[in-house]
Every structure is written in structure tokens, then in C-alpha cells.
Amino acid sequence: MSHFNGVAQIMIKVLLFVLVLGMLVLQAFAAPLYQISEIVIDGNRRVERRFIESVLGINPGQVVSAADIDRGLRAIYATGRFDDVVAEKVLVGDKVQLTYRVTERPLLRELQFSGNRRIKNDKLATLVDAKRIEFFRPQIVAPAIEKIKMAYMLEGFYATEVTPEVEINERNEATLTFTIEEGRRVFITDISFDGNTVFSDRELRNAILSKEKWFLSFLTSRGAFKEEMLQVDREMIIDQYYNKGYIEVEVRQPITTLKEDQESMTVLFEIDEGRQFFIGEVDIQGDLIKSREEMLAGLTLRPGEPFSRKALRENMMALNDLYADEGYAFVNVSPITDVDPFLQQMNIVLNVERGQRVRIGRIAISGNTRTRDKVVRREMRLAEGDFYSASKMNDSRRWISNLGFFEEVNLTTSRGDDITLMDVEVDVQEKPTGAFSIGAGFSTADGLLLQGSLSQDNFLGRGLRFDLAAALGTKSATYRIGVLDPYFLDSNISFGGDVYNTEREWTDFSRRTTGGSIRFGFPISDELRSFLIYRYENKSIFDVETTAPRSIREQEGKSSLSSLTATLTRNTTDFRPDPTLGNVTELSVEYAGLGGVERFVKYIADHRYFYPLPWGLVFSARGQIGYIQELQGRPSPLDERFYLGGMNSLRGFRNREVGPREVEEDGRGYFYGGNKSAFFNFEVTFPLVRAMNMKGLVFFDTGNAWDKNERYFTDMRYSAGVGMAWNSPMGPIRFAWGYNLNPKDYEENSVFDFSVGRMF
């Protein structure tokens, strides 16, 4: 009986399902259908009727249901161009006139930002999913606000508020404005570490990019909190441990805490150091170009020393360069490591696949719109047909950059027509190398200076250096024209010359010269170059003070100079227009006596040293020593002697007022120049505005000039101070404030030197 009841219940459920399904089918067949006689679009002003009809999907004469009409309504609304869409049906006879009434959204005519100082409008506009002259969609506002806030958070601003405002004019055009309250930037006030014993907190702080706030953060933004930088810091901490052999180190996600003032952030790095691992066996295998013993001897990895990922990379790069300099451009050096956790050792095998040895195929120059190909090509340290060399490729890039003609220099390689050939593409971006200026300048040495100049370091695109200049000041006047061809007749010989006329008024006398020079230069090596310069001048010393000492008055009058100067220059700097690393050494000897009246030999040795420091700082040191040897019993010329003081020698002293001084009976002192001189400059430069290449500097100077009967390095003078250097569009701007560390009675405690504009 129970079985019968179960079957009956199932049959009843089936009958009910069939009944409901039948009712739904009948209802569907009973749904009203409409034959469309006409479609009317009402309310559109900017959106064309044809566009609306194309998305509607209903045509006159078509029979449609209410669901079809509703789908058309949703399709029109989905275009995003309308605030509202309504469908109306009007019976006309036995057919229906279908009307869609639309309300257009306003046209987004303008997108504005106000209150933003840290992030420019162009960058903010990319965060808003809207373009000008498209229909305004309210749904873009909330995501845009979140993106703008996130952009400010990445810059260290965590309290930024963004308020949107939409204004619609009578033409139904919208202006969307985001008003931004940036708030104050969040700075890191404390960086701490937990679990570190191998490195001190200070060592780890120096190793990472994030820094703590300091007293100059309002200028340099040092210490500004940037969350994405913390992930880089985490990897840098791991790298520090890997370089000490702690390959099991774990650095957890940094913990950041925003203080109540909403402007200060603390950062904590939690570290699990693990065990230290040492180098076990070291071997090398694969395509060896020397014996295995020789190759191993060239490595710096030594068994028993702590493992260092940095040392491993350096050895791999050294092997790569060794092969690449022999023409194996596609060499692959891969490490095979085997970790022994029981012995805490890392066994290392360096596997070398040298690949095909290749030569240089085609060298193509591109991007040089003004400079001729040969000017670039002659700086290449590789020629077509040479075996490929990685070091010579790097040298080529450096030499082309040192021309000073290009903003960017890129060397790329690609396989040539043959697998044994490699083509080189030299892509450069020209920069202005000429200048025409009419203006004014000022320096503490020359006073006001009116000038006009035409100069070109890449004249005619041939690398010629040409300048034509005239300068007229309150204390000096200069007229000069000169040209130099660094590769005369496409040879390695430099040839050029200049003619000039100068007049200069000093405190004790005035000097007028008319002359010229011819110069020859030739390279001895890539870093060493020699010049021979012949100079001839007719000059006059006049307006000598009547109370001046005899050593000055006896040289009043006209004279002539005919001299030959030999110079030897060695330059190993990384970038000659603005060095940060390397040395410049110059030795020169000038002999006057090839005719003319004056007789002397002048010796000058000058050395400059540059070394990069952290945070973009550069340390430089300069030393110069000079000596004039008198010939045939004649005193050295007054204007050829050594006068120190001023911007180019000893800052903190007035120009030309360091050296031998004679005091007359009236108590007035006269500087008459020394036959000997030596000075030393120690300087640290730091970036002020990187984009403008504006630099600040602190310096310490010492030196003096001495008469022929005095000894070198007696009574050395000392100064220290600060300054700035900027190659501005109007010309170089330099200033230095120097403090005299041991002033004499007639000297000032400090001197401010300033110059602006091109001085000749």
C-alpha cells in the first residue's frame, strides 16, 4: 500500500509540472505583438538619429513584442550617451508608432584640476577615464577620485582629499573639476630593524633607498614615504645578506605605522637571518679559451670564503667580458650551484657556452640630422671587419658622448646577413651646439660686460669649433675670432688658430694686446694628447699708477711676445663636459724667445681628480703649480706672472690679490705678481635641481704666489665656503662665497664672487 501511495505522489507532481508548463506556453503565445509602422526618435540634439537606430535593432514594418521594445531601450541606454530613455507606443490603425524619448547627457567640454601642486594636470588627466568632447558619464568620477588619491599616496601624501564638481551650462556642456587638497607629505621619521645581528641598523639604513627625514627635507624631499620603495628596500636587504653568505635569510613585509599627526611614518623590517654558507668547490667548464687552471686563477671566488652573490655576478661578468673582447659576442656564462646544508657550503660550477665568434659587419649612424656621419664614425673604437669587443663598444659610446654634440648616444647590435657578422646601429639625438647671444653679463672681476657672440662647437656639422666674440665692459674689452679642426684633413691632427684684441684695466695698470695663435695637436693614445701652440702678441702696459713700485713702473711701454708652448694632457674622466670620475692632468711649457722682445720660460703642472660619492655627490680636487724662469737677465713680464685670488684660483680672496705685495711710503700696497705659484682646491658638489643640472658646492682652497727669492709653500693662504654652478640658457652662472680663514690687515674676512653670461 505504501508503494502505491509513493507512485501516486510522483504522478501528481508530474501532472502539476505539465499543467504549469502548458500555462506558460499559452501565456507566451498569448503575449501581444506589434507591427511597427514608424519609429520616432525624440530629444536627441548631438547624437545622430542614424546612430540610435543602428543600436536599436528594430525597423519599420517589423513585428515585435514588448520584450523586443524593452531590449531596444536598454541598448540605447547602454551607449552611455543618455541620462534617460523612455519607449512609447501609439496605435495608428492596426499598426503601432514606436517613439523613443531620450534625454542626452551633457557633453564633457572641459576637465579641470585645482589645488594640485605636486602632480601636474597632464598626469592627473590620464587617471580620469574621460576625454574632452565626449558625453559625461557620472560613473567615472568615483574611480577617478580613488586613482588620484593613489597617485598622491605613491608620492607620500596620505591625507589628500579630492572633491568633484560638475557645472552644466545652457548648451548642455559640462565642466568637470576636481578640487584637490594635497595635505602635507608623509615623511619617515624612524626606520628600525628587528632580528639583525650580522649588520647594524646603520649599515642597513645606508643600504636601502628609503631614508629618514632630516632638517633639509623641505628642500630635498629626503625621507618622503613611498610604499613601493619599501619592496625594493626589502630586496636590497636580502641582497646584503646574500653577499655575506646568508642564503636562508627571510625579510618579512615591512610594518608601517602612521602616527597621530598624520605626517610621520615609522617603518619596521623584521629579519630572520638564518645560517651563513661558505664557498665549497669552484670549477669552470664548457668552451674554454684558456686552460682550466688559467681560467680558475682569474676568478676571485675562493673555497672557504663566505658565499657572495655579488662576487658570483662579478666573476660571471668578468668571464663574459673576457670572451666578448675576443669576439664571442653571444657568450653565455651560467652558474650551476649545489647547496650542502649539512656542511653549510655552496659548490659552484661556471658553465661557459662561447657561441660563434663574430666580426663587426655594417656600422650605421642614425639620428644625426646635422652632424655628418664621419664625425660620429671616427670616434668609434671599432671598425667594420674588426672582431667584436664589448670594452671597445663601451669606449665608443663614451667617446661619442664626449663630443658634447648629442643628448643621447645608444649603440645597439643585431645579427648581420651572416651568422659571423654583427651589425652596429649608432643612434644619436642631436642637441644645440651653437649659440648666438647679445646681452649683458656681470662679474666681480670685470664688472658690467656687454657682449655679442656667435659660437658653434659643431660648425657645418663637421665637428669644427668656431667662435666669434666681442665683449665690452667697464674694465675690459675683448674681440676674438677662432677656429679649430680636431681632425684636420680627416687625420688625427688638430689644427686651428685665433686672432684677438684685448684691453684690460687692473688696479695698478692697464694692458692692451693684439695678437694671434696657431695650434697643432696630435694624439699619443686614446687618453693622452699633445699640443704645440705658437703665439705672437704686440702689447702695451700703460696707465701705471705714479705711486706704483719700480718693479711695475719699469715695465711700462710697448713690447712684443713670440712664444711656443708645448702641452701634454691626459684625460681619463667618464664624461668630459661634466666629469664625475677620473683624472685630468696637464703639463705645459712655454718658451718665449723665438723673436719678439720678451724672454722667459713658463712651466705649469695642473691635475684634477673626480670621485663619485653616494646621493649624487661628487668630490673633486685640483692642484696647480707654476714657475717662470727668467732668461738673459730680463725680468719676467708683468702680465705673465702669477696672480691668485678669485673664482678660478683662491675663492674668498679678491681677484689677483694673493701673491707678492709691495707697500709704498704712502701705505698703499701693490700686487706685482709672483714667479712661483701653487694652489689647491677641494670641492664637493651636490645636485640642487637635477632637471636643470643646477649644482651646489662646498669648498676648501689653499695656495699662494711667491717672488723669485721666496720659497714654495711658505705663508699658505686658506679659505672655505659655499657656491653654486648652473649652465643656464643665458650662459654659465656661478657664484661663490668664500671665508678667509687667516685674513691680513688689508684683507676682507669674506668675499662674494659672482658671474653670469659668457665671458671671453
Image: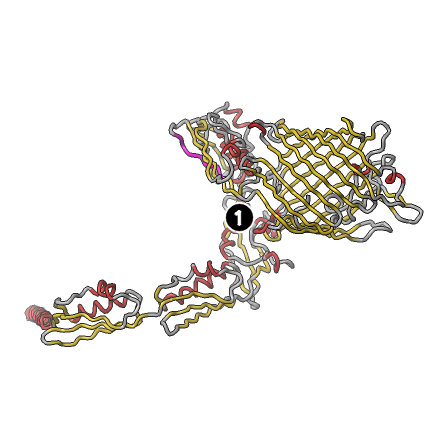
Quick check: 701 above or below 174? above
Give the image's coloring scheme.
secondary structure
In percent of width and height, residue 146 lies at 43, 64
The C terminus sits in image quarter: top right
**Image quarter for residue 89?**
bottom left
In percent of width and height, residue 175 lies at 41, 69
In percent of width and height, residue 659 lies at 82, 42
Q: Dot 1 lies on which element?
A: helix
Q: Label 1 sits on what residue type? A: Met
Quick check: 98 above or below 417? below
In percent of width and height, residue 253 lies at 49, 55
Quick check: 536 above or below 20? above
Residue lying at the far top of the rendered structure = 291
- Left/right placement of residue 403 relative to residue 362 reads right
* Residue 735 appears in view: no
Q: Nearer the viewer, residue 612 or 14?
A: 612
- Left/right placement of residue 549 relative to residue 16 reads right
Q: Is residue 271 magenta?
A: no
Tell me the magenta residue range: 410-416
Report crowding for label 1: few under 14, some 14 to 19, many 20 or more residues within 10 A (C-alpha): some
**Image quarter for residue 529?**
top right
- Left/right placement of residue 83 relative to residue 25 reads right
Q: Nearer the viewer, residue 44 or 353?
A: 44
Residue lying at the far right of the rendered structure = 665
Q: Is residue 414 magenta?
A: yes
Magenta-colored segment: predominant secondary structure: strand
The N terminus sits in image quarter: bottom left
Residue matched to label 1: 236
